[in-house]
Image (cartoon, grey):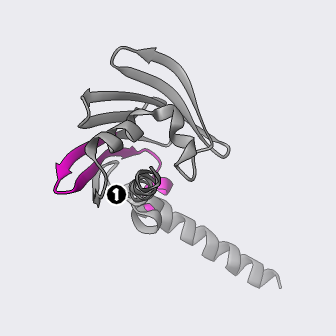
Amino acid sequence: MLTWVMIAAGVLGGLGLVVYATGAMLPRHHVARVEAFIPASPERLAALVRAVEAQPEWRKRVTAIEVVERRADGLRYIERQGRDAILFDFAETVPGARFTGAIADPKLPFGGSWTWDIVPEGKGTRVRIQEDGEVRSPVFRFFAKFVFGHEATMRAWLADLERAAAEA
């Protein structure tokens, strides 16, 4: 019996070492992009993106937004998803067309920024999101690369945006 326990512990320890070593070899920084055509006006989509405080009404995983600071060029807020809370800086860098949001907490195991581009296209709008990210933890890097994908959160965000635009 003790032999099986030791074998199981060795296998689990070995897997942990492989995950850590593989993650350590991956680059800390990454760029990921997603885009979608949404059959809504650029003005409607820009209004949804801009109204950060209303996002818990249409983003599935967001439970609350708490504005910490308002500035002429944007705001700083805490986004809550369940027990997680992330501090963001948000700005509208090109009125109605480009927005930026950056994680403002350097203590997290990840960080970086998103840039949203809202581009009129035919009878709708092309929405592009680019993530310029950093994953500090080798274990998180492994899972971000091989399990979740760097695009997963952006794809969910776009799906929520499309749903919200259709409800108007």
User: Relative to 93, is 88 on the left or the right?
Assistant: right
Type of amino acid under label 1: Leu
Q: Which percent across, then down, holds residue 112?
A: 37, 39
Q: In which quarter of the image is residue 111?
A: top left
User: What is the residue that sits farthest to the left in this orientation?
Assistant: 122
Question: Which residue is nearer to you in this view: 10 or 15?
Answer: 15
Q: Residue at x 56, y 65 (%)?
A: 16
Q: Quadrant of residue 70?
A: top left
Question: Which residue is nearer to you in this view: 115 or 54?
Answer: 54
Q: Is residue 18 above or below residue 112?
A: below
User: What stretch of residues is rendered in magenta?
Assistant: 114-142
Q: Which residue is drawn at 26% across and 44% down?
A: 42
User: Relative to 38, is 121 on the left or the right?
Assistant: left
In the image, is residue 31 part of the stretch drawn in magenta? no
SS majority, magenta: strand
Q: Which percent across, then down, holds residue 29?
A: 31, 47
Neighbour class for label 1 at 10 Å: few (<14), some, many (≥20)? some
Name the quadrant of the N terminus. bottom right
Q: Which residue is drawn at 37% across and 37% down?
A: 47
